[in-house]
Image (cartoon, helix red, strand yellow):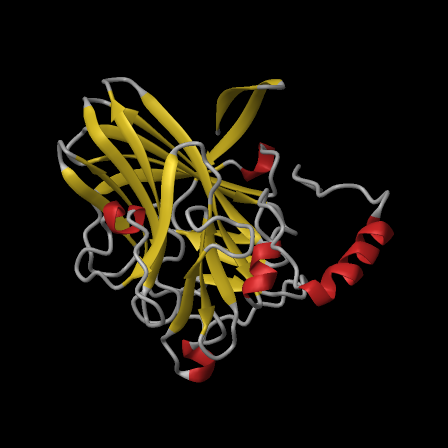
Amino acid sequence: MRKVIFLTAFGFIVLSSVSQSAPIVMKGNYIYTQISDDGTLGDGMDYPGIQYDPTGNGNFPGIGGKDFLQPGNPWEIFSIKNEEEGIVNNNNVNGIVDQMTGTLTDLSSSSLYDFYVRWSGSDKNNYFDITLDTYFNKNDKHIMFTTSIVAKEKLTNLKFLRAIDPDQDINDHGEWWTINARGYGSIAPEDWVYAAGFITNWTIGLYSNSSFTHNTGFGNWTPAASDPDNYLSGGDDGVGDFKIGIAFNLGNLSKNDSVTFSYAYVLGIDPDDAADNIPGAPAPIPEPTTIFLLGAGLIGLAGIGGRKFKKTS
């Protein structure tokens, strides 16, 4: 076991870290997933990909059940683009060669979250180091990510993408298509993109309110679905078996400069439910007929403590 020391706004925190072979399973009351050896969610064709129990009882369907990422060759990626080396990406599809190598470390036992896994790696051309933290609490309905990139050489027009090809209706209904959209109510299109099941309406989305320039998009873009620029342009191909993603324009980095930013996958039984589960986002604007009921509900909730973000026992 080794110890990692972090300086935070609250002082120094010492995290005991346990290096572990992939995959690392993260199973809460609502979310069941795993982190592969390339840092992506899922692990090739092995279950789970991303499973969800809206009851919060931890009763997940397992193999052959509803899964936002499985079956078949799942497609969940992160990619980095810069002028010095073009696009490099890691993709959990079997048979695709990853262009970044790294190791997994389980920090859950001493973090502020119930589940906290770190993937640390670098590109094969040795232009940058990357750290990708994946974390959530057992009662969360979202998966948080914090990504840090450190330039080992000058990086020009640095961009980052996280994206997924969601297939939540294929196991139960044989349907690959999803209904895709950017933004929702008062949530800006550049902050939120989601895909709802064509049959079930079950929803997965990507969200960020980062101060870095960012945008969302969805489409096919074969073979360029790993290009952050397609998402930064706000691509919108409508309904279909498409990828959804969020991309960040991080500017230029000099050698030894670094950037850090956060984003999340959010789950729900429909688009409205998923929007309600976005961490830190403004609430969607309710329909006029529900405003009175919402107000009454808020009065009833007065005095109840806020959401806990610390790790619970």
Residue at 15%, 40% in the rendered image: 86
User: What is the residue that sits farthest to the front in this orientation?
Assistant: 288
- Between 294 and 94, the one lying in front of the other is 294
Q: Residue at x 59, y 42 (%)?
A: 280
- Looking at the picture, tell me which residue is in the foreground, 112 or 251: 251
Q: What number of labels is visible?
A: 0
Q: Is residue 78 visible?
A: no
* Residue 16 visible in the current orientation: yes
Quarter of the image with the C terminus is top right
Left or right of 86: which side holds 270? right
**Residue at screen point 67% across, 66% down:** 55
Q: Quadrant of residue 255?
A: top left
Q: Is residue 218 above or below residue 19?
A: below
| Residue 92, horizontal then vertical, whole percent | 30, 56
Relative to 259, say whether 256 is above or below.
above
The answer to whether 189 is drawn above or below residue 15 in the figure is: below
x then y, percent, for residue 287:
66, 64
**Residue at image point 85% right, 46% down:** 302
Residue 81, given in percent of the width and then of the height, sits at: 22, 39
What x and y, as percent, mark residue 277? 60, 54
Q: Report the side of 3 relative to 82 (left or right).
A: right
